[in-house]
Image (cartoon, rainbow, N blue to C red):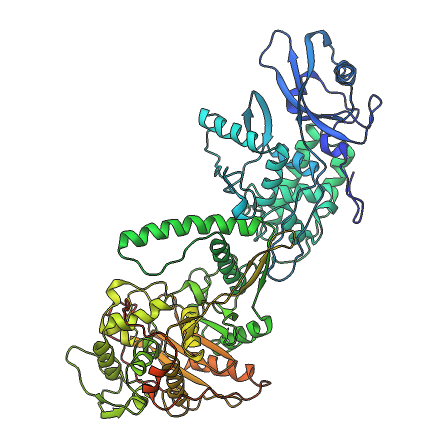
Amino acid sequence: MTKKHGQKDSVDCQHVCGFEDTIMKPERIKSVPAFMFSKNKHIKGEHMEFYQLKITRKGTKPPVWRRCLVPADTDFAKLAAMLEDILEYADTENYEFEFFQKKLRLQNLEAQTAEATKGSYEYAEAKGRQIAELLDTEAWFTFRVKGMELPEYRTDIEKKITDEEKAGTPEILKETRSAEDDFWTADMQTKNTELEKKYTKDEILEFYLNNIYFGNGYYGIQAASRGYFDTDVSFLSLSQMAYLCAIPNNPTMYNPYKNPDNTLGRRDRILKNMYEDGKISRREYKDARQETIVLSTAEPTKRYDAVETYACYCATRALMEQQGFEFRTDFSSEEDRKTYEDAYQEQYKTCEQSLYTGGYRIYTSIDLNMEEQLQNAVDEKLQDFTDVNEEGIYTLQSAAVCIDNETGFVKAIVGGRSQEYDGHMLNRAYQSYRQPGSAIKPLIVYTPALERGYTPDTVVEDAPIEDGPENASGRYLGSVTLRYAVENSINTVAWNLLEEMTPVTGISYLKEMNFAKLSPEDERPAASLGGFTNGVSPVEMAAAYATIENDGKYREPTCIVEIQDADGNAIYQKIVDEKQVYKTNAARWMTNILEGVLTQGTAKGMALSETASAAKTGTTNSNKDGWFVGYTKYYTTSVWVGYDIPAELPGLTGASYPGEIWYDYMENLHKELPYADFVAPLGTGNDADAESGTDVTEGNAAENDTTGDNTAPAEEERR
């Protein structure tokens, strides 16, 4: 029997237990997991429940326990007597049939689906006794509770018996299963007993079906049903259900898109086992095998794009925040760091699992039109670079992030170049940390200097420094203004200024803006030119430059606006907190200077035509990393270009590929927006003392070139 699309959802007892009027021989009793006493000549009923049936053959041990589906109002004594007739035992005098009076509360579960909208994750309760029997046919493992043998299902999902209310969804199965596990140890029996004490069989099955991985990014039976067949689980046919249940055993081997013959073969084996075990009739078996499986799409939906991975990351951290986890980026020692990172990873893993299984609706700030424009800008500028690595991934890569300056939310994020790839691609926008080159100068040198009495017109010296950096041109200009030094990215000036205020002070600003990979070894003058131990991410750079545009006030970057539970209740709403990192007037003067970078500096000719704009370029030694970070009143966008494994790219500067990506994207983005100028600074940099803001005076680390060169990247960039 198969279901038709649109048919009312109900339990089909023949599918559930597979026992019509089939004559069962005594020797087959052990292979039958459940009996059905409905829709036959002896007993009829609508409200069916499961009980335990104890079958004992005299003179043998131990007894066999089997589940039994019977009407709720059954006379058990009468039913036990009927078993002899129903099963037509030849030696009924040698068998005893008893019903275990502890009822297994196995209800008819209705399928429920969270609305599948952008940024939402589906969660569904399994309707299927059919699905349960299909999984039971797989016989993945059995565990014993109080002497009973009850079917259970093997899974790699990690759950735990604990207080789960904070996580937003019960967590019940935190025992990573493997084929090599010994499920019969006393310890395992104890754990299973604890599960039984806390959760019904119904709940265990429900959580299992909603957590197991069905391949191609689909967690849970409902997600798999909608992903592979574009329908609710309640409308699946027997053949489709068997097909889905073939996948979890090995999602790679039985990937419906890559290995369809394997999936069909396993479906057929499952159906055959069901038929041989009496769970389905010969006609049902034949019809299900002959049914043609048609997937909703010819290829799997791309599951791991930059938006999804970043949204999952931000949502996971939002759940951690909601549960009271305190994030840190500054540590007193390596031991302190390790202790924190261990706690972070454990909590992150728990919340990430909850995110996929808790029925949450996730609302993000991502604008898909802006996302597409940014991705296109990256792809078009790098389209001539076609070399790939052993995995088929482009060797030359890029990452970019756009932040809304009004709200502080991420509007678009690109983690790499577009290409077809099976698997989880690296999202370089927040997962990769690279040397920033001179793009770091406004953050740890020049804006802090403007807080300390320097002005754009202050005269500084460009001269050789013993054991210090060189200028890319090899020339030294002597006395120049601070403005000129910034516009032309003069290395010696930045080095001297950071030494004057101390690297500890300069790096403290990055700490205030939660740069995650700072190291104690970074507190040195080389940081003034982007020489860091680990590096910075495009998300961090975008948020830091957005801080300058926002009058020195920092906002933690995220794309999560709100998280709702399965019932539509808001469990997390992002409250944008602002922290004054730079003095207001110092930030405004920095913007004023950076406007000149686009008109007469290292990115001359790249000023936007439709609105005021400011930016800074960055290039590391040997042209390994190129950065361009710029902003308007509306948006801040950071762009990085380089190889995943650092290598020289001839011609790479901040104003070349990164700058061109930035310009094309931002120019197009602002075409329909009104012209907006930046707020003018008041008087000179000394007026910052009269402005509200925090004078940050202590801080932390800076970083090396990725090649391990502890000297600063020399730079004099041109478009």
Q: Nearer the viewer, residue 654 or 450?
A: 450
Q: Position of residue 626 (x, y in %)?
A: 37, 76
Q: Nearer the viewer, residue 447 or 25?
A: 447
Direction left: furthest residue: 466
Q: Position of residue 10 (x, y in %)?
A: 77, 39
Side of 44 relative to 461 (left or right): right
The total number of labels drawn is 0
Q: Quadrant of residue 111?
A: top right
* Quarter of the figure with the N terminus: top right
* Quarter of the figure with the C terminus: bottom left
Q: Is residue 597 above or below residue 210?
A: below
Q: Nearer the viewer, residue 47 or 659?
A: 47
Side of 405 relative to 362 (left or right): left
Side of 187 relative to 473 (left or right): right
Residue 141 seen from this side: no
Q: Position of residue 325 (x, y in %)?
A: 43, 53
Q: Residue at x 64, y 44 (%)?
A: 244
Direction front: furthest residue: 690
Q: Residue at x 67, y 42 (%)?
A: 126
Q: Is residue 568 above or below residue 129?
A: below
Residue 168 seen from this side: yes
Q: Residue at x 60, y 27 (%)?
A: 150
